[in-house]
Amino acid sequence: MVARRKEKKSQNRIFIPLEGLNQTLENLSKHFTVWVPMPSGENEWSLEFKPLHRGCKILLDRQSTLPPKKVILPQGQTLIEYEYKKSESDPSKQDLVLREVIDESPIIVFGTRPCDVRGFLVCDKVFLQGRYIDVYYRARRLNTLFATLFCREADDACFCSSVGSGPADMEGSDIGITPIDGGWILEGLTDRASEIFSLCDCEAPDEKQIEDARRVQEEVRSMRVGNLRTDGVLEGVKGQFQNMELWRDIAESCLSCGVCTYVCPTCYCFTITDEPQGLRGERLRSWDSCMFYQYTQEASGHNPRPTKLERYRNRLGHKFSYFPLRYSGMIACCGCGRCIRSCPVSIDIRQGVERVREAHHGCVCS
Amino acid sequence: MWSEITKKLQETVQNIMPQVEAVIGWERGFNEIRIKPVVIKKEGDISKLVWNPFCVQNLSGYLVKSPAVIPREGRRVAICVKGCDSRSVTALIQEGFLKRDQIFIIGIPCSGTVDWRKVMKRLERSSVIHRAEIKDGRLMVEHAEGVEEIPLREILLRRCLRCVYPNPTVSDVVIGETVSPHIEKEDLYKDVEAFERKSLDERRKFWAETLSRCIRCYACRNACPLCICQDWCIAERRDPKWVTQKPTLKDILLFHGIHALHLAGRCTECGECERVCPMEIPVMFIKEKLNETTLRLFSYEAGIDSNLVPPLLTFNPHETGI
Amino acid sequence: MEEREKTKNNTEMRILGFLCNWCSYGGADTAGVSRLKQPTDLRIIRIPCTGRMDPLFAFKALISGADGVLVSGCHPKDCHYSVGNLYARRRFEVLKDFLPFLGIESDRFHYTWVSASEGQRWQEVVTEFSRRIHELGRNPGFDMNTNLVNSEAR
């Protein structure tokens, strides 16, 4: 047994057969919370990441509707719990009891795609760099592992190759998953992978399977998803900032709802509220969206982004100009296409970027 | 058939263009099954306009929601409407948000619009869609992995399968031939009735499970042409604070309760709330119940007669049994 | 039967009463001044008029776990503001019909009319409504602390 274990520890690749997936992940779930993509309802097309439970339906055949963002940035995250208690020394007074909530439990996200992980690489810049480190984000981020698919499921909305990523981009992932006939080959990419493989209780792949996987990976590596050009948009947004006709053209049909931001792996904006319940309560960090009027509403009543046009300009500008300018050129968009796909009025951010470039180059020429 | 109507539509717009400020219609989106709204302001753009069963959006919201397309004095805005959309326009006129003489309504009889998610569900793997064509009640999708043929009825939106007003109820010009409704009017609320035969516990469980998917993106609210509070919705106010930011079922249900009860007796069942939901929650079902109630209690249907007052905005002192 | 009644009555229910300032609140006061015996489950909130009563007040209370909501105002045609209660009664009827659709018993919501002089009637209304709520038992509501969206993540 010991010997077998040792042998397993050294392996850097394992094979999971089709029918063995649930069992393998259930083995892992004794040590980790395992998040997998599954249908959000019985007959629904949409997928979302949820913690694994016995007999659940794991679907790896298409991109999830909601990204795994909430694993690390939950929609509502308690930062502090508070309670007013009668003071022991002076009964006429109340003491405030505070408790910080930091979650460090280990997590594996299984079945992410390169774009999903890229989203966290963008968020890392914001939460883990510079003078202020976000302890809540860090606690979860450091304790989360990603097992990422070599992605073969690009559709019309995908454009990951255009924003510095690609369907075979394994940056930030700990394990690479290659779908082959009859199952998946898992490949360790970081030191943390071998520990997981030893818990999986799976066989090593044979030569043929390794060869199959290599071929699939090669195929995926050769794919270029999307043909958006982003050169010039950095200055373009600045140059076209006041050109409201352009922004009207791009965002006139926007409904000002939060779909694009909530399905986006890189949109990290949040709001902080105190949610009391009698004498106790919590300080909550929850998702916010720059597409909402309240997002920029000031206490005076003034709102610097009064209409959807300014708000859409901000979303596009932030992703393709302000963020890269601040963080050494990294575009804050992972090209997953979720905002395009889920938009109720089919607004295409790629088209927006193109319009900005056109308008800008037009300006330069004339 | 669709290209003929598209052609007629473009001709009509060409003719009225000199008299109108803008035309609100549909254009092709990022692929053939995704259509998006467009506001045409100059003649050169008229060729963008299309009409086919992928034209899902109800455009009437653009007439009233800021920054709305508002005509200058003495001019009009033209808008393309399907049967369901025309009821929203009537409801907006009814409630004083629009003036009838400010708008030019281009009505298009509609035999049902397509739910893109149902199409994607039929494709084995998500892939690039090259071409989509509807012919003889069937949709042909050519995609990167092959060709799929699907009977149209199987991919229509739920709202369309229970449509009783496929033809515009109000219009200045109608393009295309009158179509017959999908169901009889008596059957309109049979889903509601079937649901009400379930036990209270089952009903509560259904909503708890279904609504737990909600991410509160407020798309259902913002897509609703009759949710006219817009940026001042009580679901987002801090004072008074109705709904917290906590993602609990109670808060989600409260939001949907706010949405539904504010639409009681006003909802025209255009189904936009349900169509736009990224999590595929049957949001309109809640409103169907309220419409069933207002129909039974007050014999009132929203968005049919612009001279009537919605039942909850008025009263009748002689009412008995209430 | 009496025994059951008694055990049920041992736990106090959470019943909310929304009373209009001009009639029913006076009526409840009359009942109190006349020392009429009433159940103690009701918590009264005074509103200017039943026309001010947003159905969402009752809706929020019921999904948050209140066991019952009672609304009472001036008799129709006797409204201090002439017609407030006539608007209100349509809204209440709609709400009452709507609640069971979500799985909440329609009997948990009740509206009625009590004038300032009807102390006796107020006693009857409260007693009857409290009895009915006790019969229905606790409202399971929609658990306010179930964090469904991220329950696993928390």
Image (cartoon, helix red, strand yellow):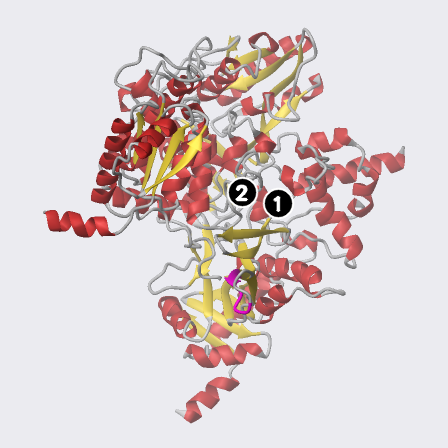
- The reply to whether discs 1 and 2 touch (Cβ–Cβ < 8 Å) is yes
Above or below — where is A85 with respect to A228? Answer: below
Judging from the image, what secondary structure is the residue with disc 1 in?
Answer: loop
Q: Quadrant of residue B206?
A: top left
Inter-mark Cα distance, 1 to 2:
8 Å
- State which region is magenta: A83-89
Examine the rendering and report whether any part of residue C98 can be seen. no
Q: For mark 2, what is the residue?
A: B217
Judging from the image, what secondary structure is the residue with disc 2 in?
Answer: loop
Horizontal side, residue C91 vs residue A237: left or right:
left
Horizontal side, residue B207 vs residue C7: left or right:
right
Is A259 part of what is drawn in magenta?
Answer: no
Above or below — where is B175 with respect to A290? Answer: above
Marks 1 and 2: same chain? no
Q: Which residue is nearer to you in this view: C76 or A315?
A: C76
Image coords of residue A227 (percent x, y): 68, 47
Q: For mark 1, what is the residue?
A: A289
